[in-house]
Image (cartoon, rainbow, N blue to C red):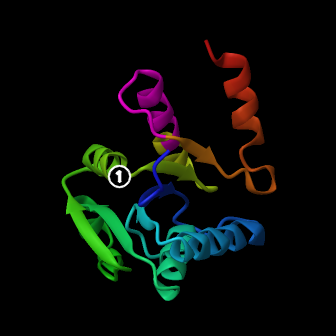
Amino acid sequence: MEPLKAVTVFCGSSAGNNPAFEEAAITLGKCLAKNQIELLYGGGNAGLMGTLAQTVLDNGGKVTGFLPEFFITKNPTFLEVIGKTVIVEDMHTRKRNMLEKADALIALPGGFGTAEELLEMITWRQLGLHKKPIGILNIAGFYDKMLDWVSVNTL
């Protein structure tokens, strides 16, 4: 396997209800920067997304966020970007760009958006649209129920 150059990370735009989630984002950010792996992410500056991106940047790493146009009109604070930001047309374009530019995908804890992104990437892999590895960081058992569901519902 080729060395990883860029990894897409899906994660929450809030910090969540467990300090371990933020600790994991910091640890992952430091690891990416140390190994000179570019972070590709949703472009947010808050929550786990903001913590992860700022940690990568603070440790000398490269960060590229993908921000849908409507986020900017909905919430101008999204313009307070971390690293390089690519403005894209919509959520589907965001996910497609994040997949195309990544060598692997990782999910940290998050909300419905993170779950949707993760499951779509799993579906696209199952359909043969990509062959990139997908990692789920099951911090403090966050994904236990989802992994149980997947294990009994995989055809």
Query: Is 89 left, or right, of 20 in this rendering?
Result: left
Name the image quarter holding residue 110: bottom right
Name the image quarter holding residue 145: top right
Residue flagged by tag 1: what amino acid is it? Met
Query: What is the x, y in percent for residue 155?
Result: 61, 11
Nearer to the camera, 138 or 113:
138
SS type, badge 1: helix
* Residue at the limit of the structure toward the right, as seen here: 140
Count the numbered circles shown.
1
Query: Is 73 left, or right, of 112 in this rendering?
Result: left
* Residue at the limit of the structure toward the left, as seen here: 89
Residue at 35% across / 52% down in the picture?
98
- Dominant secondary structure, magenta: helix
User: Dot 1 corresponds to which residue?
Assistant: 98
Residue at 44% across / 76% down in the picture?
45
Query: What is the x, y in percent for residue 101?
Result: 32, 53
Q: Is residue 129 above or below residue 142?
A: above
Nearer to the camera, 97 or 38:
38
Q: Which residues are magenta?
A: 118-132
Q: Is residue 149 above or below residue 32?
A: above
Residue 122 lies within the magenta run: yes
Nearer to the camera, 74 or 137:
137
Query: What is the x, y in percent for residue 66?
Result: 31, 62
Residue at 34% across / 75% down in the picture?
78
Query: What is the x, y in percent for residue 48?
Result: 57, 69
Residue at 40% across / 61% down in the picture?
42
Name the image quarter holding residue 92: top left
- Crowding at mark 1 (Cα within 10 Å: few <14, some 14-19, many 20+): many
